[in-house]
Image: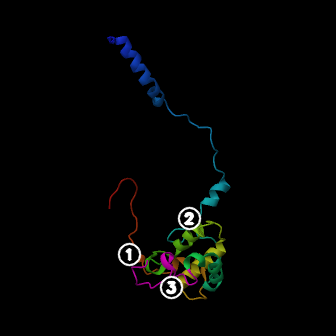
Amino acid sequence: MRRKSNSRDLCAHFALIAVPFASLADAPPERLSIGRAATAAELARWDIDVGPDGAGLPTGSATARDGQPVFGAKCAACHGEDGRRGRDKLAGDANDRDDKTIGSYWPYATTIFDYVRRAMPPAAPGSLTDGETFALTAYLLFLNGLIEADEVIDATTLPRVEMPARDRFVADDRRGGNEVR
């Protein structure tokens, strides 16, 4: 025989359902008691971005000749001795838009430095010194015919390198929010 439910039973059922959700309405704790604030030294290790205008480039300098042995030791396994291996091809004809190489696709020489310093080599990203990064950047620019082998690359000269693909990119001039251009 089925029992007829009354309003007291309905209230009890509702309470069982509503109680877990009531705690969700409470404000979250101000502190979760996990982790800690990063120190200034820890933040400085990550604050290494380099912009298209060269802002953020460190001191140091190098030439493509300096970069060739570094490339051979740390990059050639993936990119080939001349930077032209398969899918990981870095060097090529600046006019060949089918191959996305530094010379045909990259808009700013300064961001080559930024990318190499942050992401290379894949097994140890961030392990290159600033000097090695300048040397590799110079070597990559040389492989793409954009600088001479003895041309010095530093925080002053690197932003001046004109990349062939620069005009193929549109500057992001959004001011924030959901703005559509």
What is the magenta range?
Answer: 80-99
Q: Position of residue 5 (x, y in %)?
A: 33, 12
> Which secondary structure, mark 2?
loop
Q: Find the distance from the CA under tag 2 to the CA under tag 3.
A: 23 Å
The answer to whether one can see residue 169 in this image is yes
Q: Position of residue 15 (x, y in %)?
A: 42, 19
Q: Is residue 38 above or below residue 47?
A: above
Whichever of callouts 3 and 1 sits on the residue coming sooner in the sequence is 3
> Which secondary structure, mark 1?
helix
The answer to whether one can see residue 154 in this image is no
Q: Is residue 27 above or below residue 3?
A: below
Using the rendered view, name the quadrant where residue 116 is placed.
bottom right
- On screen, residue 145 versus residue 13, left or right, reads right
- On screen, residue 155 versus residue 163, left or right, reads right
How many badges with numbers are in the image?
3
Q: Find the distance from the CA under tag 2 to the CA under tag 1.
A: 23 Å
- Give the main secondary structure of the magenta stretch: loop
**Residue designated by label 2:** 49
Q: Residues within 10 Å of mark 2 (few under 14, many from 20)?
A: some
Using the rendered view, name the quadrant where residue 8 is placed.
top left
Whichever of callouts 2 and 3 sits on the residue coming sooner in the sequence is 2
Q: Which of the labelled discs sits on residue 168, or is there none?
A: 1
Which amino acid type is shown beneath numbered disc 2?
Answer: Asp
> Which secondary structure, mark 3?
loop
Q: Residues within 10 Å of mark 1 (few under 14, many from 20)?
A: few
Q: Is residue 50 or residue 86 the one in the foreground? A: 86
Residue at image position (54%, 69%) is 115
**Residue designated by label 3:** 146
Q: Quadrant of the N terminus?
A: top left
Whichever of callouts 2 and 1 sits on the residue coming sooner in the sequence is 2
Does the CB distance between marks 2 and 1 fall below 8 Å?
no
Q: Find the distance from the CA under tag 3 to the CA under tag 1.
A: 17 Å
